[in-house]
Amino acid sequence: MESIRDKIDRIKARKMKVCIFGAGKMGTGFWYDMLKNLQIEPRYFCDNDPDKWGKEVKDGIRCISPGELTEKENCACFILIGIFKINTIKKQLYDMGIETVVTFSDLYMLDEVHRIFYSQPYLYDEGLYRKRLEILEQGDERKIEIWNPNNKKIAVYTCITGNYEEVLEPKVISDECDYFVISDEKPKGTKIYQWIATKDVVPDWVEDHVRRNRYCKINGEKIFKNYRYSIYIDGSDRIIGDIGQYADRTGKCGIALRPHLLYPDLDVYTEAIQCVSCHLDEEDLIRWQIESYRKENMPANFGMFECGFIVRDHRNKLCQEIMERWWKEVFTRSSRDQLSFTYCLWKSGMCACDVGIIGKGRLDGGVQGVTTVHYHH
């Protein structure tokens, strides 16, 4: 199989006409600049949106239709769009007869991309970081305790803050589980999920919607301490099977997760590039955070997990330690939790193999028991 390095070299050697498929933020921003830094000059943009056809996109380059693209000879396409459309667009391009196709997830594999990204300067004021550290030192302020009157083993829960997602009720109920939804307002029509008000479990000093969600997501052991296990699922997932079975999947560290949807052997350094390229958080904050990990000698290729489906053993001391450290990172640094989880794992003396594995990632159709219905960044 041709490597991404060989493919890039072939594109340059044959002086292929380069088209960026995707005339949105990714294609016109971070990755456009990165291609130019790699001495790859885009000649066209292409998009499935007819409103963009014929219009100038950037630097005098216009957007062509897929029909026009099929007429271009000696053309290579770089798919620079949201990750959940990549496979669809790849098939579309191959069906159109375009043989040389590169995705942004391919570009992550190039050493040059990492070298260019990490050589760029950044400026970040650490004042907010220090302020948040001081807040954490003041201690927790949870107001209620979630009881377990029926002595169930597992608390299954989701958390929706900001009222931007519907509540997807479980299709299958396990006798071992109680089911909860933590949200700002009581959802309408829920029959299985028991409602917990966000304000009743999240400290008042956690002010933004994203971190209020992250507090609940990471601190399941504290919120549901009267249960042996907690299982968190993203609000965009629906339970369609016996989710209680996953309580036995926790590894040495008392945690089970899904592998990363792209490359499970990648790392926080690649994840940082993805977060910046997709505008998922403040760029200088991410660069500063990852540079601090680099200074601590956080190893490359340590591994990566999805963090939208989390199983925890509350009695496992390592689990407690990792979750406490993880919440500290997410509260004081970037709210992108995948960016810091493996760092916290490493700081606790663990490796990726110490985490239990559930499923094969979000893009393979979902793991047994949980399937993706829709997804929000």
Image (cartoon, helix red, strand yellow):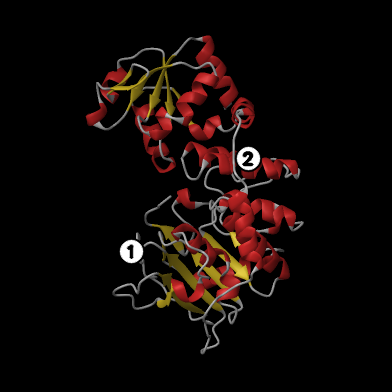
Label 2 belongs to which residue?
A: 269
Which residue is painted at 52% across and 51% down in the image?
Answer: 361
Label 1 belongs to which residue?
A: 166
Which residue is painted at 50% across and 72% down in the image?
Answer: 156
Q: Quadrant of residue 250?
A: bottom right
- What's the distance in space between the residues labelled 1 and 2, CA to CA? 33 Å
Picture layout, residue 174 above or below residue 38: below
Given residues 335 and 301, the one toward you in this image is 335
Which residue is painted at 44% across and 52% down in the image?
Answer: 365
Picture layout, residue 335 above or below residue 315: above
Q: Residues within 10 Å of mark 2 (few under 14, many from 20)?
A: many
Residue located farthest toward the top when viewing the structure as drawn = 14
Question: Picture coordinates of residue 79 (x, y %)?
Answer: 42, 30
Q: Is residue 354 left or right of residue 32?
A: right
Given residues 162 and 112, the one toward you in this image is 162
Which residue is painted at 35% across and 67% down in the image?
Answer: 167
| Image quadrant containing the N terminus | top right
Picture layout, residue 23 above or below residue 151: above
